[in-house]
Amino acid sequence: MRAFLVIVDETDEAHKALRWASRRAVAVDGAVHVLALVQPQNFSAFGSVQATIEQEARDRAEAVASSAAGALLAESGKMPQITVKVGEGRKVIKEYLDEHPEIHALVLASGENNPGPLVMHFAESAASLPCPLFIVPGHFTNEDIDRVT
């Protein structure tokens, strides 16, 4: 089964990537993996304060991932695999791809005026990825995405 990995957050780019991945998954009878990232917190003056900040960030990431999963389920009838990981984004994504050989493609979307740090990084290192990289152009509308998928 083909699976598509989407990195989710609250940006328009994440919604575009998720739409593209969900449409492709339906077309090829595949699956979608949703990965929400939690940046590690640098504040460490008080352990309990840091733990609270990290838990709030994790809760927020889980809420974003769950919302994305609900939207995907409503739209395509497919329930994605949801994962929330703490760590530096590029490293966590690479580790996730290495751990999940069923991932057929990493799906990202560019901003309209700026590709964004993940797009820039993975576009530059695409040759070392274990799967193809799909980048949805930032100017694409939902209709554009539907048309090409």
Image (cartoon, rainbow, N blue to C red):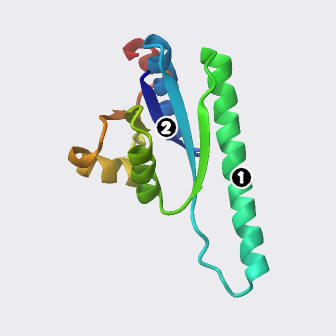
In terms of sequence position, does the residue under pointer 1 or pointer 2 come before the other?
2
Q: Is residue 57 left or right of residue 86?
A: right
Residue 138 pos. (x, y %): 41, 36
Which numbered tag is attached to residue 42? none
Which numbered tag is attached to residue 6? 2
| Residue drawn at the location 25% of the way across and 45% of the way down | 126
| Residue drawn at the location 79% of the way across and 78% of the way down | 48
Amino acid type assigned to the residue bearing label 1 in the image? Arg
Q: Quadrant of the C terminus?
A: top left
Element carrying mark 1: helix
Instruction: Kindly give the residue lying farthest to the bottom in the view shown.
Output: 45
Residue 46 pos. (x, y %): 74, 85
Amino acid type assigned to the residue bearing label 2 in the image? Val
CA gap between label 1 and label 2 equals 17 Å
Residue 11 pos. (x, y %): 56, 43
Q: Is residue 19 above or below residue 95?
A: above
Q: Picture quarter containing residue 28?
A: top left
| Residue drawn at the location 52% of the way across and 29% of the way down | 32
**Residue beneath disc 1:** 60
Instruction: Kindly give the residue lying farthest to the left in the view shown.
Output: 127
